[in-house]
Image (cartoon, rainbow, N blue to C red):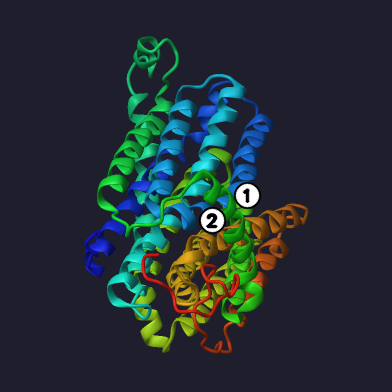
Amino acid sequence: MNRLLEPRSARRRFVAVTFLFWLPVGLYIPSQVLLLTERGMSLAVVAGLFAVHSITVSVMELPTGGLSDVIGRRPVLAAAGMLNLAALTVMALGTTVWALAVAMFLMGSGRALSSGPAEAWYVDTVQAHSGPGAELRTGLARGGTASAAALAAGTLLGGALPLLLGLGPDPGSWLSAATGGRVLPLSVPALLGAAVGVAFVVYVLSALPEPPRPPATLRSVFRGVPATVAGGLRLGAGDTLIRRVLLTTGAVGAALATIELLTPGRAARLTGAAESGAVLFAALACTGFVCTAVGSHCAPPAARLTGSSEHAVLASIGISAGGLTLLGVTTAWDGPVALALAVTGYALVYLGLGAAGPNENDLLHHRVDSSVRATALSVKSLALQSVGALVGLAVGSLPIGPLPWLVGAAALLLGALLWTRRAKPVTPAGTASTAGPLSTKEPVPGS
């Protein structure tokens, strides 16, 4: 039997694996669209490629969460890392639409596989050592900080590398000539991300021990995953607190879709040109990641200050709603004051979301057991993406001005108001028992 890791050791490994997973994402974000257009893809084709990624994630989100609950966290995380490094390699070297579509499919599959197992592994490990009532908030907060820090660092490095490689009298020609035109300066961040992906897979396989599980046959997987997914879908219907978490996550998805859709144009209008607006947007994106990291780090103190995780979510989402409202009411303003207020509002949105996330997940993990933990996180991710997609379509059809921003702010405010009353305590829900998908039996640590 595997020796149980102490909570502190599990927390360090969770932070490390989280950082290693998100660093490649930060590396390729600044150059992704530019690389695709450099390969000759039109913006319409680029949008289609992004749609391949989004559809893949949405379709695979719940089945892959169920797979992690059936066969274990470590093999699913390792598979996610393998798919991501393959996707980044193909994206860096691919020159045809079909090759790039395959890259987006692989990337979407890897993202779906990764959207719960690491956090589920951490919670399982801590509860196996310290019991179902173990303190989780600190580790979850540090995981949120690690992901945001990885994105911030990766964005800075990924944005600087092509620029540095393009310096000189004949920018990037030596690199292109040496690789037959396959590798451009804009390809290097994705290739570096693939190298980090190798380190991620090695770390997952060597540093994330799991308690033994019953041997999984192909038949048991096909039978177990649908049952686990069905149980995950029923979680919100059977528990008020879980329903609040999912509804709040949908509100956050609406806010993020609003910001991601409207901020680039807002930045260009504030600076007066598309080129300078792109620079401002890159700086804002990095600022958002940093504020998310700070907010995540402050999640445990926020819960102590407000008296509970529920009150901390209420206050944090309220701060984000205030920031998005500030972004909305200043849309008609010009000049340095408008810029300062817009940046302040943007920072408040991400600071609040960073503080809310670990407290929401702390509540969620104490409400579900190991048998549906990764599935519950997948349901949460699906709520974020699906509501965000729908609200993004609505916001995109509205005229430029305060109204689109205020739609996102209203969604966040409604999400905050869900937490004005505390939910009644119940025993964790799961799918592992004969009592059905929402069993009230105590969770089995590490099961």
- For image coordinates 62% across by 34% down, the residue present is 49
Q: Position of residue 175 (x, y in %)?
A: 36, 16
Q: Which mark is residue 216?
A: none
Q: Which residue does the image show at 57% across and 41% down from the upper left?
A: 273
- Residue under label 1, please give it: 58
Closer to us: 364 or 36: 364
Give the residue at x 64% y 65%: 233
x and y, in percent, of residue 113 in the image: 49, 48
Judge whether residue 308 can be spotted in this image.
yes
**Compared to 52, does 400 lie above or below?**
below
Q: CA distance from mark 2 to mark 1?
A: 14 Å
State the residue in front, 7 or 414.
7
* Residue 179, position as x, y percentages in the image: 38, 13
Task: Name the secondary structure under disc 2.
Answer: helix
Side of 55 where 159 appears, left or right: left
Per the image, label 1 sits on a secondary structure element best described as helix
Closer to us: 37 or 249: 249
Image mark for residue 66: 2
